[in-house]
Structures are given as C-alpha cells and as structure tokens.
C-alpha cells in the first residue's frame, strides 16, 4: 500500500468521525433531558398516592405524558447509538477496502446513508419529544 493511498483513506475517514462527535453531543443533550424527565417522574410518583379527585387525574395524565417523553428520548438515544456503530463500521470498511484492495464502496455508502437516516430519525424523535 502506498503512502498517498493511506493519506487519502485517512482524509476520507475524518468526515464520519466529525459526525461521531456531533452524535456524541446530541446524546449528551438527550441524556441530560432524560435525567430531568426521570426526576420529574419520581416527583409525580411520590405525589400520586397523596392526591384525589381532579388533582389525581391531572397527576395521572402528567405521569403518562412523562412516560411518553421517556420512551421517545430512549428510542432517540438507541437510534443514535446504532448510527454511531454504523459510522464506526463505515470507517473500518474504508480502511479494509484500501488494505485489501477490494471494492466495498456500495456497502460503505449504504451503511453511511443508514447512519444518516438513523441520525435524522433520532432528531425527529427529539423534535417530537420537545
């Protein structure tokens, strides 16, 4: 393997790595939100047995709403983790392609597009949660 080919492969691999950084930042934001929502859920669960009538119904509605938010953020984080794995596989396949001298571009492209789709889906879930 010649030096220019290795340099070119490293340059190609840098773009997905920047995407990994962005996904990590988004996951940090989502995990912080998830923590706050779980804290709110605990407060509501403590309040639940102490209420009656319309106040009790309002607490139950909010518990259901909070549960839905937890579900959406959990799903978004899952999709971001899978997207990160796809990006990692993309980088590995770029190097394998150059080292082995085989054409993996259709597979690399498909996996990277899947990572982008998962990222977009996670962002849409986040939008829905907010």
Image: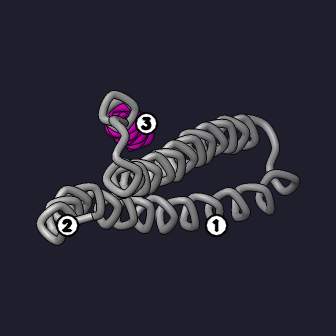
Identify the main secondary structure in magenta.
Answer: helix
Q: Nearer the viewer, residue 126 or 130?
A: 126
Q: Which quadrant holds the C terminus?
A: top left
Give the x, y percent position of residue 111: 41, 36
Q: How is the image coloured?
A: one colour
The residue tagged 1 is: 39
Label 3, label 1: how far apart the Cα atoms are: 20 Å
Q: Identify the residue at horizontal 37%, vertical 57% (top origin).
A: 99
Q: Which quadrant holds the N terminus?
A: bottom left
The residue tagged 2 is: 2
- Above or below, 30 relative to 79: below
In this rendering, would 62 be left or right of 25? right
Label 2, label 3: how far apart the Cα atoms are: 44 Å
Give the x, y percent position of residue 79: 51, 42
Q: Identify the residue at horizontal 84%, vertical 56% (top origin).
A: 50
Task: Report which quarter residue 45 is drawn in.
Answer: bottom right
Mark 3, mark 1: which one is toward the viewer? Answer: 3
Q: Identify the residue at horizontal 60%, vertical 48% (top origin).
A: 74
The residue tagged 3 is: 125
Q: Identify the residue at horizontal 44%, vertical 40% (top origin).
A: 129
Of the numbered discs 3 and 1, the one sitting upstream in the chain is: 1
Question: Is residue 127 among the parts visible in the rendering?
Answer: no
Is residue 70 in the magenta section?
A: no
- Above or below, 125 relative to 91: above
Magenta residues (range): 111-130
- Contact check, label 3 and label 1, Cβ < 8 Å: no
Is residue 121 in the magenta section?
A: yes
Mark 2, mark 1: which one is toward the viewer? Answer: 2
């Amino acid at each position: 393997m010649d030096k220019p080919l290795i340099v070119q492969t490293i340059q190609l691999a840098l773009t997905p790595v920047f995407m990994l950084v962005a996904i990590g930042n988004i996951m940090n934001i989502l995990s912080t939100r998830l923590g706050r929502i779980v804290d709110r859920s605990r407060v509501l669960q403590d309040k639940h047995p102490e209420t009656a009538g319309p106040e009790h119904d309002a607490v139950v509605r909010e518990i259901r709403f909070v549960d839905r938010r937890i579900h959406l953020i959990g799903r978004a984080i899952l999709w971001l983790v899978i997207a990160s794995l796809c990006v990692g596989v993309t980088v590995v396949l770029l190097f394998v392609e150059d080292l082995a001298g085989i054409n993996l571009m259709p597979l690399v492209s498909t996996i990277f597009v899947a990572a982008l789709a998962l990222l977009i889906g996670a962002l849409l879930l986040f939008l829905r949660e907010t």
